[in-house]
Amino acid sequence: MSGLISTSGLGVSSKLVSLTKHTKHPHDPSPVVPNFIAPPVCTSLSFQPIALAAAIARTATTWDDAPKELLDGLQQSALVELETLLEVGNTFALKSYFKFLADTAGSQFAAKVGAGMTHLYMEALGYEWRANAVCLSSSLDPHADFIYGGGNVVGHGVVLAEAHGSFAKDVTAGKITSAARRKYKKQVKAYIAATSTFGKIIHGYSIAFGSKPTAAGSFLSVSETRISKPGKKSGTAPPTPPKEGRPEGAPAPIVLATHRSNFMLMGVPEVVDWIDWLRAVDGAVPELEPVPLLRLQYAGRTYLTSAPLVQRTGAPPWWMEEFFDHPYWWRIARHRDFPASQRQASGLALFAIEEKGGAEFLNGLSAVIRGGRRQIPPSFLLPTFDPVGFGFVDDDRALPDIRDEGDRSYDYAQFRDGLALLGDPFRGRPRDVLLWSPEGGVSLGR
C-alpha cells in the first residue's frame, strides 16, 4: 500500500455549496444530556476539490473490521471516479461522462460524494473524530452511517450522522430536503439516547446532497435533533452549570477507529495491525520491527508520512547518506521510474499527518502496547487543528485559511485530527526519518 493517489483531474478552484434547507426534529428529553449545545448551522460550505477527495477517501475507509487491502482499493476507486466525473470550476457540477454510467454505478458514486460532503460539513461544525456506525445494530435495521466525537460533544457523548447523495435528472431542492428528513426519522431518530461502543449518542444529523447531471449547481439539506431552549416548557428548569472536571480527551475507541483509517490511507499498515491487535480478543502479536516515517516540511508545516524505501533494519539506505547534500533525493528515491519532465506534473497527492498530532498518538499507542494486556485507556488526549482547504464562509464563524501568505500556492487539505492530503508532494522538503517502535515510541532514525 502507498499513501500516494492521483488528483490530476480535480482542479484547484474553491467550490461553494449553499444550504438549501435546515430542519430540526423534536426529541424527548431535550437536550439528551444537560449542558450540551449543538454548533449553530451555517448556510454556506466552501471547499477545495482536494478536500472533497480526501473526505471521500476517509469515509470509504471508515470500516473497523474490513481488511486493509479492501479499504485501499475502495479509496483508490472512489478518487479515480471523482477526478473523472467532477467538473472544474467554482460551482459544483458533473462532467458529461456521468451519463454513461449505469444506474447502479451512478448511484454508488453519488453515495460516495454524499458521504464526503457529510464529512466536510461535520468537520466544519467542529467535530474531530469519526467511526462507522455499524455497531448500532447487528441486524438489517437501518441506521445512520457515521459516529462523530470531539468539538462541542466532548465530555457529553457522541453524535450520529447519516449521509445521502443523489445525482439524478429529476433532483430538486424539495427532493433533497425530503430525503434528509426521511432518513433522519428512519435512520437517526431511533438511536438518539442509545449507547454505542463509542459513547452515548446525544444528538444526530441527516445530511443530503444532490445535483442534476445536466446542470451546474447543487442542493444541500440538513436535518438534526432539536434542542429545546431552557425553560421553554412549563416546569422545566434551566440546565445547571457544567461541573468542573469535565472529561478531557476523546474516547479511545473512536480515536483508534479514526487513526486506523488515517494510517491505512498514509500507507503505514504496521500501525493498522497494532490497532487491530489491541482491539481483538485474540490473535498473534504483530512484528516489533521499528516503522520508518518520513518528516516532510510542506506549506510551512511538518508532517509525518510513510517512508517505504527505508530499510526495516533501521539502517539508512543509500539516499539517506547524502540527504543534506541532495535536497531532491526524495523525488528520485520514491519516483525514480518517472521521467524528470513528469515528476512535478504527475498530479500526485500524498496522505500525511501533522507531526505533533501523529507523534503524540503513536507515543500513546506505544504506552498501551507496552502494557502487553490490551488494556486500552478510556481516552486519548491529543492535539487538534483548524481545517485547511474547507470550511464555512458565512457569519462570524468563517474558518480562516491558516496558511501563511507565502504558502497559499500549496494545494492541500488538512482535517481537525491532523490528517492531510498534500497536493504535489514533490514541493515538500524531506527533513529526516523518524522511527516508531511499537513498544518504545517515536525517535529519530539516525
Image (cartoon, helix red, strand yellow):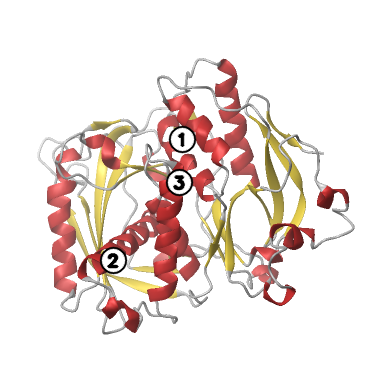
Position of residue 139 relative to residue 295, above or below, is above
Residue holding disc 1: 256
Position of residue 209 relative to residue 320, above or below, is below
| Mark 2 neighbour class, 10 Å CA radius: few under 14, some 14 to 19, many 20 or more | many
Q: Are marks 1 and 3 in contact (CB under 8 Å)?
A: no
Residue holding disc 2: 110
Amino acid type, mark 2: Ala
Give me the residue at 70% from left, 66% from top. Answer: 427
Image coordinates of residue 89 in percent, x first then y, are 44, 82
The Cα–Cα distance between marks 2 and 3, rounded to whole angstroms, is 23 Å
Amino acid type, mark 3: Glu
Q: Earlier in the sequence, mark 1 or mark 2?
A: 2
Secondary structure of the residue carrying numbered label 1: helix
Q: Earlier in the sequence, mark 2 or mark 3?
A: 3
| Mark 3 neighbour class, 10 Å CA radius: few under 14, some 14 to 19, many 20 or more | few
Front position among marks 2 and 3: 3
Amino acid type, mark 1: Leu
Residue holding disc 3: 69
Left or right of 27: which side holds 53? right
Is any part of residue 425 visible from this angle?
Answer: yes
Give me the residue at 78% from left, 52% from top. Answer: 431
Is any part of residue 393 visible from this angle?
Answer: no
Give me the residue at 38% from left, 38% from top. Answer: 64
Secondary structure of the residue carrying numbered label 3: helix
